[in-house]
Image (cartoon, rainbow, N blue to C red):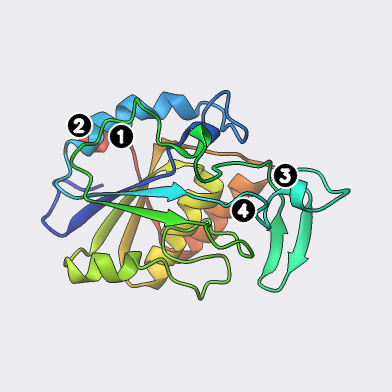
Amino acid sequence: MPASLRADDALIVVDIQYDFLPGGSLAVAGGDEIIEPVNVMARRFRNVVLTQDWHPAGHISFASSHPGMAPFQTIELPYGTQVLWPDHCVIGTRGAEFAVALDIPHAQAVIRKGFRETIDSYSGFSENDHTTQTGLAGYLRERGFRRLFICGLATDYCVAWTAEDGKAAGFECTIIEDATRPIDNDGSLARAWDRLNGLGVAKAQIADFL
């Protein structure tokens, strides 16, 4: 685990938004438990980026957009298998807002994702076609960052995909495991860690930064 942080480190805080917290439309169990530890840990980092799920109404990933389908069923789209979700993080709604308890005033950038109607986006780096870029990689490269530490919601989807794409873009990536919480539908958490371990994504714990 990192003995000390470096000037080329950045913390990526993924999707701590109301719809992913208890009471939200796509609530992640225990999602609220990580907010204060993330706030405390973020103070150790000079450089922080936030990602924000940002969907138009009627997004292709919503089960409600596909008559007869239910949340957590899957369909095939041109870019691959798509999990269908409850409507969530719709632009202009409270559910899309960052939790008011998230207190990282020195965060320097917000990357919004999933705003194209016909493609979902888990990763902070690219949409689910693995081609359409958010611009995060270019931002991080231009600022000279090399090591990324990733936390937030949810472990097995947006956190994992952000780490995978970060590795593919040439960054060292570490997931701060206990600063995440999973959805874990039908073994998705185990599958995500199998992929991450195979790519050499490292794990850390909140205590490593305190």
Apparent side of residue 76 relative to residue 205 in the rendered image (left or right): right
Residue 126, horizontal then vertical, whole percent:
47, 66
C-alpha separation, residue under disc 2 versus residue under disc 1: 7 Å
Mark 4 residue type:
Arg
Residue 196, horizontal then vertical, whole percent:
48, 58
Mark 1 residue type:
Ile
Q: Earlier in the sequence, mark 4 or mark 3?
A: 3
Label 4 Cα crowd, 10 Å radius (few <14 / some 14-19 / many 20+): few
Mark 2 residue type:
Leu
In the rendering, which numbered label is found on residue 206?
1
Name the residue carrying label 2: 210
Apparent side of residue 117 relative to residue 199 in the rendered image (left or right): right
Label 2 Cα crowd, 10 Å radius (few <14 / some 14-19 / many 20+): few
C-alpha separation, residue under disc 4 versus residue under disc 1: 23 Å
Name the residue carrying label 4: 191
- Asked where in the image residue 102 lies, by quadrant, the reply is top left
